Image: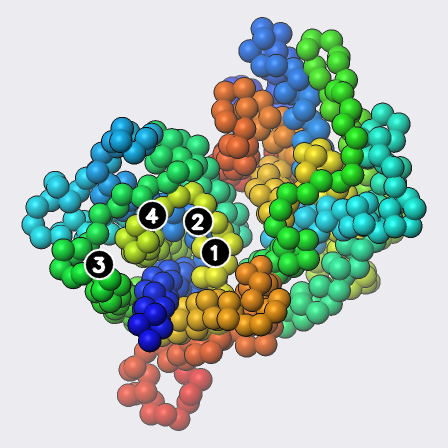
Amino acid sequence: MVQNLDWLFPWRWSLRRLVVAGLLLLLLLSFFSIVRLELVVNGLFLGAIIALGAMGLTLVYGILKFAHIAHGDFMTWGAYIAFFLLGTLLPRLGLSGVGFGPFTFGPSLFLALPLTILALVAIAIILDRIIYQRLRRRGIGTVVIAMASLGVAIAMRGLVQVIWGGETEQYPRLSKPFYQLPMDVRIPPDGLFIAAVTIVLVLSLYLFLTRTKMGKAMRATSDNLDLARVSGIDTGKVVWWTWAVGAALAATAGVLLAIFQAQLYPIMGWRFLIPLFAAVILGGIGNPYGALAGALVIGVTSEVSTEWLNPTYKPAIAFAMMILTLLLRPRGLFGVRD
Amino acid sequence: MESVIGYITGYAIMATTYAVFSLGLNVHWGFTGLFNIGIAGFFALGAYTMALLTTPPPSPLFFEDFKFGGDLPSLIGIGDMWFIVALLAAGVACGLVALIIGILTLKLRDDYLAIATLGIAETVRLVFLNEKWLANGSKGLYRIPKFLGDLVAPQNYDYLYLGVAIIVLLIIYLAVERVIKSPWGRVLKAIREDEMTAAASGKNVFSFKLQSFILGSTIMGIGGALYAQHVRFVSPETFDPLLATFVIWAMLMAGGSGNNKGAILGAFLVWGIWTGTQFLPGFLSDPNFRFVMIGVLIVAVILLRPRGILGEEKRVSRHVDETRGAASPEA
């Protein structure tokens, strides 16, 4: 009888075993003060923001079959639309104020965030109508569509610079002290908001994909486009919903990133593209829960790496993780084979 | 008048340099269908290789932090041979990086290469920015010697360098034309059109893609070195993906991917638009507006004229005409 020696090879492990092993390793390291637990916690916040972007990106990737390179710039647009609302429009309407409850931002954010989402969803659907839909109908290869999205990415960022200028901006905010938790963990004042929004959106996405007809249609289309079409699924509608979900998540990710970093600048989304794609590939293309797991892994790893490396190397760490995944598990952590 | 000629010469040098990149990208995208969006990385690597190999060792007089300056000019005495050595070294450096990236990603989905090149470009930029011992960090390298600097007066040097750049471009152009029209080049086009058919015809698709990726990246490395020698200053900020990657994509797409003449034409045309818009009135001269135009240009070419201005020659082999006559243009 051949013994199963899989446990000797970590890259063959199941996802559950990998995650448990990773968590144990981190706990062990922080117990011996090799890694500060604070970095792990902050990495989870960063991972949550990556996750929102990456889940949308992986849905677009899985259903429309192309690498949507403008996804980072969707996030930038989300951040800037909210900046316009929070900094210019809403104060003029008398809705201003900062330091709402325990947070740095004002109550107007709860109005600005849904409006931002709506605006970005509209932008995404319009872009699909005038660009991507035509290319799809012509039966053009997905790489060319990806290239068109590269053009869109450049134009979108250029527009941000034309409209808002290239400087670093900030939402109206009131500085608040960090929360002090045991074991020297400090949590940024908006951390709880970021965590709450992410949890709500992840749960809604889960319910949407598993309980609604459209969500099931999206999953079916992602699995097999032709099969979905012959079983009577309106793939045109699926495409609309895919953009809507992707753009809504990207807009939220952009706003949360601007809050988390306490600044926004035109290239923020483009710089975020590497962690986004790393999370998507880590989780397996088309798998939103995989992207969530991948994003948390990327977030924690790149944050913990700042213990030894210059913090600017974070994107390079995400890139290294991605290369490692491609080497060991090209289909992602979940390891589904075609 | 002097200044106008000077301006045009400066424009022509940069356009020629970009044409080299456009040719390299044409090998990747135009002939093989490889999606490289990390041109900025190869640009930086080529330029830094040239700079590091030729700069004299660091001197405390200049408050320089880097540890190694190749100082090739004093090592290689014969004329200004060091220029050619450094140019080739830049190509080799990029070729090696392409080899590693290619082995990792070319067996996987098409678009993994795009994501990997994006990552390598950012990593290269971060390394040059952070590792002061390697390349002087954000201060950059600014003591790159002048190739054939003793030959002409400094105010006339640009004319000489334009000649050098054109010669390099011409050599690369002829070389690429030659390999693309060879059986090797036809395999690349076959892979671009249909990988499965190429594989079924007994061609090792992975190996051909890898060779094409290395060739194009080597050309980009030479382009980077050509650039470094022109401005004789490199810093991590120079190689923003905005300029280095996207403009070159716009050049190839506009000129006509799959056509080397188109690649060169596109470089001169787009660089002309790029530098020319500064003379436009109002917000049109806003440098940020150029990025919008570059992006719109790429999308518009894909939507309206996928073949670009010149487009690819339909003819696969000149023997087709000889055997069949002009009767079947589709052949």
Viewer can see residue B141: yes
Along the viewing direction, whichever of A106 and A328 lies nearer the viewer: A106
Are the residues flagged by discs 2 and 1 from a single subunit? yes
Mark 2 lies on residue: B239
Would residue B280 appear left or right of B26 to someone viewing this image? right
* Residue B183 screen position, x and y as percent: 29, 68
- In the rendered image, the quadrant that contains the C terminus of chain B is bottom left
* Residue A107 screen position, x and y as percent: 89, 37
**Labelled disc at residue B154:** 3
Marked residue nearer the N-terminal end (3 or 4): 3
Mark 1 lies on residue: B243
Are the residues flagged by discs 2 and 3 from a single subunit? yes
Along the viewing direction, whichever of A75 and B174 lies nearer the viewer: A75
Name of the residue lying farthest toward the left = B78
Q: CA distance from mark 3 to mark 4?
A: 17 Å
Secondary structure under tag 3 reads helix
- In the rendered image, the quadrant that contains the N terminus of chain B is bottom left
Secondary structure under tag 1 reads helix
Are the residues flagged by discs 1 and 3 from a single subunit? yes
At label 2, the amino acid type is Phe
Residue B300 sits in quarter:
bottom right
Mark 4 lies on residue: B233
